Amino acid sequence: MVRRSLVAPVFKHPLSGAAARVHSELKEGILTGRIPPGGVIHEIETAARFRVSKTPVRDALSLLRAEGLVQAVPHRGYIATEVSLRDFEISLRSFTFARSLKVTRQRSLRSTRHQNRWSTWRALSAAGRRPRR
């Protein structure tokens, strides 16, 4: 039996492409207050605004619903929920943590590439061959 983790990795966005862009913009709008609490979000209007089909919008809204930032109302759309200071703080911490993981990973990859180049350079020099640049 394979165990699945219920928590997605923090540094990787669970959506990709257009859905990730729509999710990020809507989440930012809700957290900053551009989309007020009780504000209605319609799939068709949102799809037209972002120039995407309804599928990425649905994916983004379902993730926002799982995060507790919107509520689905049948035949009406989605309603933005009120964001407390605690919710905002948690969101900010997770974003900061994800960003620090991404930066650390990039630095690690850069360092590894540099070490690989340097070891190749030394090995070729020791063998009497001229390394390429």
Image (tube, helix red, strand yellow):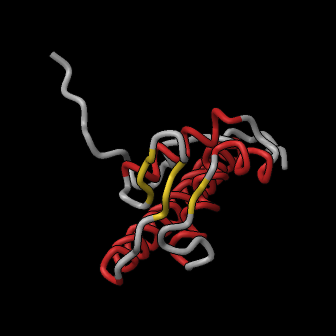
Residue 116's x, y, as percent?
59, 48
Q: Is residue 52 left or right of residue 120?
A: right
Residue found at x 29% / y 46%: 7
Q: Is residue 132 above or below residue 88?
A: above
The residue drawn where x is 62% and y is 76% is 34
Instruction: Compare residues 43 and 112 and report the one nearer the observer.
Output: 43
Quadrant (top left/top right/bottom left/bottom right) for the N terminus: top left
Query: Which quarter of the figure has residue 19?
Result: top right
Looking at this view, name the residue that lies furthest to the bottom: 85
> So how many labels did they put on this image?
0
Left or right: residue 32 compared with residue 73: right
Q: What residue occupies the far left of the structure in this picture? A: 1
Q: Residue at x 42, y 61 (%)?
A: 69
> 40 left or right of 84?
right
Q: Tell me the residue at 60%/55% (across/down).
A: 41
Q: Can residue 106 be seen here? A: yes
